[in-house]
Amino acid sequence: MREPDRIIRLRTVLSRTGLSRSTIYRKIAEGTFPAQLKISTNGTGWHESDINRWIADPVAWRPKHESDAG
């Protein structure tokens, strides 16, 4: 059975990527970093698999489209 994709918070994303908070949000706006998910009224997080894909190849990273899932 496949393990569910974890949601990780900003602090974990910062430590894993080595990027600053402002750089992450700039890259999200440029479309070169995974966008965050709204997980509560005041909380956001990222799919751990998206961050792992970005870390593996930051230059070639592109957002997954629904048609790419499979």
Image: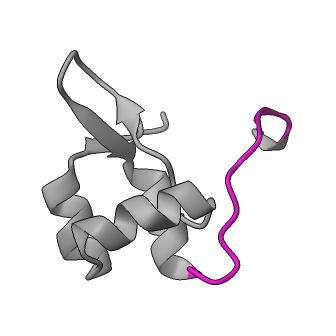
- In the image, is residue 65 part of the stretch drawn in magenta? yes
Magenta stretch in the rendered image: 57-67
Residue displayed at 49% across by 67% down = 27
Residue in the foreground of this view, choosing between 64 and 25: 25
Residue displayed at 24% across by 66% down = 21
Q: Quadrant of the C terminus?
A: top right
In the rendered image of this protein, does residue 49 appear above or below residue 20? above
Q: Quadrant for residue 32, please give it.
A: bottom right
Q: Position of residue 39 (x, y in %)?
A: 29, 24
Q: Position of residue 10 (x, y in %)?
A: 21, 53
In the rendered image of this protein, does residue 49 appear above or below residue 38? below
Q: Quadrant for residue 18, please give it.
A: bottom left
- In the image, is residue 13 part of the stretch drawn in magenta? no
Residue displayed at 18% across by 73% down = 15
Residue in the foreground of this view, choosing between 1 and 34: 34
Residue displayed at 70% across by 78% down = 60
Q: Give the left or right position of residue 31, taking residue 49 as reference.
A: right
For the image shown, how many numbered marks are present on the structure? Answer: 0
Residue reaching furthest to the right = 67
In the rendered image of this protein, does residue 19 appear above or below residue 52? below
Residue in the foreground of this view, choosing between 29 and 14: 29
Color style of the picture: one colour
SS assignment for the magenta stretch, majority? loop
In the rendered image of this protein, does residue 39 appear above or below residue 69? above
Q: Position of residue 40 (x, y in %)?
A: 23, 18
